[in-house]
Image (tube, rainbow, N blue to C red):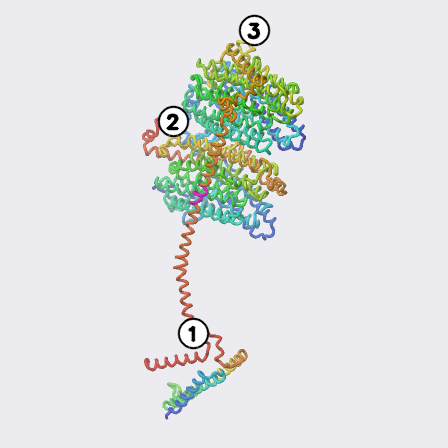
Amino acid sequence: MDSVGIMDKVFLLPLIMASSFVIILFVGKRFSERVTSSIGIGAVGACFVLSLVIGAQWINRVDNPPTGAAAVAAEEACLGGPGDDPQAREGGGRGAEPGSAERGAPTGAAPGESAAVLGQEGGGSTESPSAEGGQAESAQAKRGETIPVCASITWFETAVSTSQTIKFEAGTVLDGLSALMLFVVSIISLLVHIYSKEYLHDDRRFTHYYAFLSLFTASMLFFVLGSNSLQMLVGWELVGVCSFVLIGHWWEEGNNTYAALKAFLTNRVGDTGLIIGVIVTFFAAGATSFNVFRLNEAALSGKVSSTLLLIGAIALFWGVTSKSGQFPLHTWLPDAMAGPTPVSALIHAATMVVAGVYLIARLYGVFYAGLQINNNTINYVAFIGGFTALIGAGLAFVQKDIKKVLAYSTVSQLGYMVMALGVGAWTAAVFHLFTHAFFKASMFLGAGSVSHACHHTFDMDEMGGLKKKMPITRWTFMFSGFALAGIFPFAGFFSKDEILAGAANGQGGNAYTIMLVFGLVVAFMTAAYMGRTYYRTFEGEYRGHAHPHESPKIMTIPLIILTTFATIGGVVNFPGKLTEWLRLPQTFGGRLEHYVQPEWAGRFPTLDVAEFNPWLATGSVLLALLGMFIGIGWYANRLYERKLTERSKVLHAGYTFLANKYYLDALYENVIRDRGVFPLARASYWFNQYVVDGIVNAVGVGSRSVGNFLYKYLDQGAIDGAVNGTGIVSDESGQLLRRIQTGKVQQYAALFFFGATVLTIFFVVFIR
Amino acid sequence: MQLAQIVVQDTGSFFRTPLTYVVFIPIVGALFMMLIPRAQESFIKWAALITSLLAFGVSLFVAAKFDYNAAKPEFFANLPWIPVINSRYIVGIDGISLPLLLLTTFIVPLCIIYSWKHFPEPHNPKAFLILILVLETGMVGSFIALDLILFFVFFEIVLLPMYFMIGVWGGEQRQYASIKFFLFTLFGSALMIISFLALYFLSAKVMVDGQPMNSFDMMLLPELARGISATWALVIFGGFFIGFGIKVPIFPFHTWLPDAHTQAPTVGSVILAAVLLKLGTYGFVRIAVPILPDAARSWAPWIGLVAVIGIIYGALCCLAQTDMKRLIAFSSVAHMGFVMLAIASLTPFGFNAAVFGMVAHGLITGMLFFLAGSTKERYHTLEINRLGGLLVSAPRMGWILGLTAMASLGLPGLAGFWGEFPAILSSYKPTSPDYVTSFFGVEMQPLFQGYMVVAVLGTVFAAGYLLWLYQRVAFGTPKEEFAHDPHLHDVTKPEWIAWLPMLVLIVVLGVYPNLIFRTTNDSAKRATAVLTRQSEQTGGTGGEGSGTGEAAPPPSGGGNGG
Amino acid sequence: MLINAYLLLAAVLFCIGVYGVLARRNGVLVLMSIELILNSVNINLVAFGAWWGAQQPCGAAQGCAATIGPVFALFVITVAAAEVGVGLALVLMLYRNFKSIDIDQVDSMKG
């Protein structure tokens, strides 16, 4: 097939990382740190190179899209079967059911056979004219569309009804989105691998750390490449486990294990939604496949009830809520900072936490149709996203711990991405995912570098004035901060601006004005807390007691690379209008949109992409600058010494509210856990021991009492009494009779004679 | 009453079917071991191990020769056994029993290896191993028997060795636990045999040697039992429900389980969890549902209800535990709830999920009990508050516990997931689509969707209690009293040999679930095909129009997503 | 012929014998008393034999009554001899075990 290249062999990437995991885990201890880390770095480096090659091949494929038969074949590969209409397929299946039930059930036809029969009947006998017509038509329409490259194998097969056996597939999808994610995951993972070599130097569990870093990368790649929702669920949970293990890396300390547990359990709460969502969408799409394109197709076909889709979308979003730290399940993410800082950068900033965003992007058809994004001015996803962005930014103000600032900032930015998806700005969300990965990873690694220099503290009270001692860290942190704040021309500006423009523009002319306001407020707040953080860390006087020094090159080079992307990364989706005004070549603008946003009728909604809006852009930059000045000015002018929060009741209440994290943790831990689940658990166990088991024991004791009673009175009293009575009677009579037996022979003789005499008299007198 | 049209003929031969060997090798081995003097311990151990490995080898042979597309009992034999009541020696395995057969013969050698050096007090390996082998015969026999009386006999054979294992080699309260176990399960057996007999007398007759006779043949009874009146069918199914349910165990008949598990010796717990509990669910899948499909449908909401109660209730009880082994025992209640939920869905998918769930639970919970046993052996306590820092004291064991706990909470990529997720999935859309009934005014599908949501909540609790357990046992640093305890060694060689196959299987099944789904699928379809058959019949006699009219307007099917 | 005198003698001897058996404590004297009883019987036998023989001569039909009495008496004498032998042996054993032949003291079979 033309222009497929190695894109159908992408399963190699997770495989490489998985083997790296196995090697490091089982034989890593025998090697030195150098060798261990080299195995990990080598594997992830190979992935990075492959991801570059794959990216290039994908770009080539978009520029030279397959047509005709190749397109149809590609489509079939991605849909896991002939690309006929889902409803026709379903109708065919329905029609065929009684027949094949009779034939299939008693003889027990081979599973493959029956599936094939079904497929043929679905597409063939009942619906053949329209299906063929549809195929010809779709082949026509494929011109210019970019069909993803898919490959799959049978994962498991099982009957979904007595007449229907379905082969469920495990496969890979390579399209713009997954190629982009491959690039992001592998490059950040590579840099984190390199950085960790120094950061985790002489750690007690160095091999273990590298092994799980590899496993995480494998799982993340697996998740990203998954061609069906079930596979994504698998990847989703696996990254969660790696996160659990790595947060709890230093598990000797109670706090870390607590944070790890909290992360896993919170995610598990969200997973309930994901599981239900996967199931609901599976049935909504005709209960034949978990294939993401099938799901999107069914959702966008308009033939599935909108209520069902809404339930599916919201259930899936509940999963996203936990994994991507959305309100109200974001509370685990700041605590997850207990893990090593490179882990925070990789997992809890750049990759794993965007899994939720990726999930929405991948199943966008379901969300688009379920939430009716093109038909609303506000929806659940957008609102939760915006709200999360707001509260995350608010919390970032009151943190002393630099990593916690970054964590809440991540929560906030994830909210931004989710909001973008909620308002229909798909490309903007993906773009922001891309830029955010770089600048946030850079800042986390920067924070790690600072802490490496300051005796492993993350407390900003013990920092300050580090700009002279750690120039590289300072500059990279500052540039990344600009990117985060959305200052022109850093990468964050472009992506954030696109989101704002998307919210202002909406889909089909329905502007998400409220979300735009949220976005602008958050932009202001983001800049302000970044100003505060930067100033507290790098400016002013040093307040700690260590002797800070610049980190070694192995740590700063990743910082520089990441910051480079954070600085100039915006060009990958340079606004088209700006290209015109600046008289740049036309192909310079909107590259990301061109290569990443899918164009595949029926499997991805047709989206209006918002134009660049200079007024909005200028406004947001001004807001950001204002925020930054306020944030820096507050500390530079020592305004905090006026203790506003202590003097004003309102402000104090606000501060307390923020400092207690909106009391969400208190709600979860003190109310739901300590007052809800645990008492319920104890009550259940009490119920079990004293009621259920009590009944059992009562039955046991009761039977025994009845038994005792019977034994005592019936058995021992009456029945055995009779037996014993016989004995007693014999005994007593014997006692009486024994007196006769004196042992004196002469008495016997006397009796004998007496008896003989009596007998004689008797015979003589009576018998005669 | 139907006329007896079915003529029973002898088929197969006792000595030709390999199943005979799988069943009787262990007991022959046990008899042989009785001849060995008690003092020759290593000879005894080797004899037991070789016997169990032989049985495993034969069952592997069976699996290799098994025709995965046949969807009917294979290695079939049907021979006279007790002619007076027409109870016959009918054996055979299909896709549902094969995985369980393999699980049984797989677990037993591992148990023997595990106890190689550490026989629980009062030692006496000879008696212990003989009991295990007798147990194996009972378990294997239950899975291959296709005659109700034969099944019952094997089912009961299992009780006695287990009773002695708990009662003799158990913990402090072994007397109480063993008697509770024995009486409770015997009570279930009593209900079961009554149901068997009712089934026997009420179903149609078959021709045996020209004589019409009632039959205990599980393969024929689905056909023969069609004539049983609905009321009787419900009553008989009720007997099965409680009889098998006690063994599963379902709420509220589960209380024997924690005591038995907690007091049993490690190997006893492992076999109990891995195989014995499966006899109950297997009874549902093999006997109760296929023979009485209509009653099964009426009982399904109840089964589902006790299943989800079990899931939540077991999980909550786990959270309240202070003893590791007891916690694992309660987690069995929760996990078997998923299996029961899958069975209650009465779909082939649900049956597939149920069998997978049984195997996965057998491996995972068996493994957890092994770990609990080894923990006890090292710490001499299972009080969770006193444990801690297992990852420091015995790192490998700590990691194994982590992996197993993850598998137990249903992590995708490990075996537990494929028991849990499909069970949840299958409950989204229970039974055949034309099935119309309501449960206290709730339609079946919404009802089971409610169950589904509750079951999903159960997965959160599962993660909660398992990880909380893991946090308290493995994380942190060892408590003062154990900080320098020389007994806290890492995994020993017999432990490795016993555990590694299980761990590998947990991972392999998790990555490639088709190994089991492929095996069970056709048999599950056949087992549930009877449900569609019966419902068609009911629909036909009851009047199809009125049936659908009552249910819901036709578009509801489309609204549910088809 | 009159046998009253014989019978009277036998009765007197029997009574003396019974008295001896019941009243004497000495084991040997008890044995001797038993001998008296037996001999009183012998007298009766011989006397009745003679009396019957006088009334009915010997014939083929009924046997010979006159010889039956003395034969019985001879038999009783033999038995009495044996009885005395055993009896004296018992007395001897009594003496060995109890250092006495007072049969009142020999009541270990008392119930």
Residue shown at the point (34%, 42%) measured from the top left: B1
Chain letter of mark 3 equals A
Q: Can residue A575 be seen in this view?
A: yes
Chain ID of residue with mark 2 = B
Residue for point 41% across, 79% down: A751
Q: Where is residue B112 in the image (x, y as percent from the top left)?
A: 57, 44
Q: What amino acid does circle 2 point to?
A: Gly
Amino acid, disc 3: Arg
Residue B22 is a magenta residue = no
Q: Earlier in the sequence, mark 3 or mark 1?
A: 3
Q: Tell me which chain the residue with mark 1 is part of.
A: A
Residue A46 visible in the current orientation: no
Apparent side of residue A31 relative to residue B555 in the rendered image (left or right): right
Question: Magenta region, mostly helix, strand or loop?
Answer: helix
Residue B340, percent from left and from top: 45, 37
Q: Look at label 1 and name its amino acid.
A: Arg
**Which region of the structure is painted magenta?**
A687-695
Instruction: Specify few, some or many for label 1: CA neighbours under 10 Å numbering under 14, 14-19, or 20 or more.
Output: few
Q: Mark 3 points at which residue?
A: A583
Q: How far apart are marks 2 and 3 (CA)?
A: 58 Å
Q: Name the residue under label 2.
A: B557
